[in-house]
Image: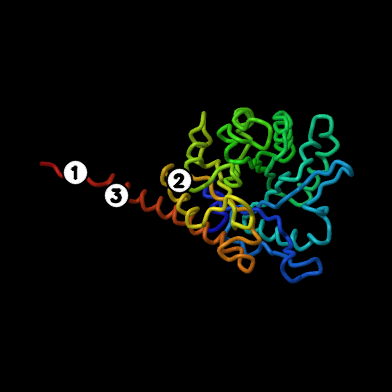
Amino acid sequence: MNSSSLIGAGSHRVSLYYQSVYDTSVAPNSPFGHYVSPLPLITLITHLLLSAFHINFDDVSVHLNDAVPEDPMFQQLWSDIAVMQSTGIKVIGMLGGAAPGTYTCLTPDLFDTYYPVLAGYIKRYKLDGLDLDVEQDTPIDDIVHLIDRLKEDFGDHFIITLAPVASALVEGPNLSGFDYIELEKRVGHKISWYNAQFYSGFGSFFPDDLYLEIVNFGSGIHPNRLVATTFTSPDEGFGFVDLDSVVSSIQDLAFRHDFNFGGIGGWEYFNSLPGGKEQPYLWAQMMSDAMKQIKANQTQLEESRSIQSRIVPRSG
């Protein structure tokens, strides 16, 4: 199964957040440090979430981490991303995250000043979508306005995802300051899916009880629209789940929902287990294999049902 077929399926996504473009702990391989190429992920993932874009209040600018996106240090990055997109992988910019300030620049009074700068970079670098990671108290109307404007400017094909902590999807602890259940009611038809954070004390992916609770909470979120984001390494923080347990939950959830499963995400790429910094793509290989197994199980079950339906009971 290649990445484009996974994308077309509308579920079974394998996504990775890519923030550490350069690894400062390893000897340089470029004038800007040790560049961590995303190209080994081709055929293994469906979505690359480029992190993190920040809007800066003081100089009305947008940064990709600590520099403007057109900085020479990102020249190789943009070249590699274009190659990945040519293979069918969707590249989504993550907006916000732990650093505060981005969404403060998108209030009604400031929107027309700061949003055009962000939109300009989306167009310039041909991003396939935005992942809204809101980790500061933000009025729900501001998020609705941003989603509406993105769809208006970039069309229905433009991917919009949100990245709440998992507990926020059952009206539990929440970093965003607004109710995600209310957001889903208002603009859920414009949200492609949720990249829920199952770590840092806001939920775990193993056992998979919280994922099931989210799917069944209130009107529920269809499992095809719920991607479970997990840590790829215990070095990322509290709440790492070993990879065999992640795969176990993937298989269990897919079976429970008639093979509907939104997918698995990882934070982040550069030090992912089991390969670590030398072979970080092996996490994606392992998760891609898990998705292929889901598809194989689905095909096997459908063939078995088809055979059974053709069996004519013998009379008397």
- The percent coordinates of residue 160 (x first, y second) are 66, 41
Three-letter code, disc 2: Leu
Residue 105: image tag: none
Between disc 1 and disc 2, the foreground one is 2
Name the residue that disc number 1 marks: 313
Three-letter code, disc 3: Ile
Looking at the image, residue 16 sits to the left or right of residue 122; the answer is left
72 w.r.t. 133: above or below: below
The disc, 1 or 2, on the residue closer to the chain's N-terminal end is 2
Q: Secondary structure at mark 2?
A: helix
Residue 307: image tag: 3
Residue 253: image tag: 2
In the figure, residue 20 lies in which quadrant?
A: bottom right
Between disc 2 and disc 3, the foreground one is 2
Identify the residue shown where x is 70% and y is 30%.
140
- The percent coordinates of residue 221 (x first, y second) are 53, 35
Disc 3 and disc 1: Cα gap in Å? 13 Å
246 w.r.t. 180: above or below: below
Marks 3 and 1: CB-CB under 8 Å?
A: no
